[in-house]
Image (tube, rainbow, N blue to C red):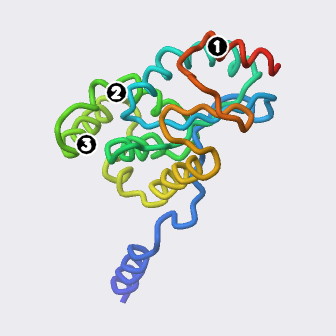
Amino acid sequence: MKKIIITSIYVFLCFLPVNSNAEIKSISEGNSNAKIKLIIFESLTCSHCANFHNNVYPNLKKDFIDSGLAYIEFRNFPLDIAALNGSKIAHCKNDGNSKILHYLFENQKNWVKGKTIDQLNENIKILIKKSNFNLDYKKCLDDKNVENHILEDRIEGVKKFKVEATPTLIINGEKFENPSNYKKLKKYLEKLI
């Protein structure tokens, strides 16, 4: 009898929706009460987005985010299936931490190569296995709540901010042109302080 009850409970639990109403945390950094609020819409396979992360973002972080002057939220705007899968990996821990996102951009050239989505998926899987993030790759890719969150970001980007390309930077609700020019960006942000 005990075995039947345990088996019944196990079967019941297997069919429960996992995280069906779980809130997915946005990936962000900085003081959420900062005067300057930045939103950046990115695609993980976009070379211009990787350029922003690797060449502009470190200065932005040092000058504005770490000092508490600005808050940044990284929004998803996948341009292809590989970028969607990368975003799922970045959000997999659902802790709002940006480490995995930065890691994927820093190593973009190592995984965004190949002729098929299967090759790109294998590349990102290998990259994640080499990391110390301890992620279950398949579980990350199968998470429908995360997928919906990512697609909702993309829809909001189009509807609310008229995002057409990546990266698109929104500063206090207004679109900022050419976020890859840090000198121009810094000058603009300094006027907002």
Residue in the image at 81% along x and 29% along y: 35
Residue under numbered circle 1: 184
Asked if 33 appears above or below 141 in the picture, the reply is: above
Q: Is residue 113 left or right of residue 133?
A: left
Q: CA distance from mark 2 to mark 1?
A: 26 Å
The residue carrying pointer 1 sits among few (fewer than 14), some (14 to 19) or many (20 or more) residues within 10 Å by Cα, namely: few
Percent coordinates x, y for residue 138 in the rendering: 31, 51
CA gap between label 3 and label 1 equals 36 Å
Give how far across and how far down residue 44 sits, in percent: 41, 35
Give the labeled residue for mark 2: 108
Residue at 80% over, 21% down = 192
- Tell me where residue 173 sits by quadrant: top right
Amino acid beneath label 1 = Lys
Q: Secondary structure at mark 2?
A: helix
Residue 109 placement (x, y as % from top left):
29, 24
Residue placed under numbered mark 3 in the picture: 121
Q: Position of residue 105 (x, y in %)?
A: 41, 27
Name which of mark 2 and mark 3 comes first in the sequence: 2
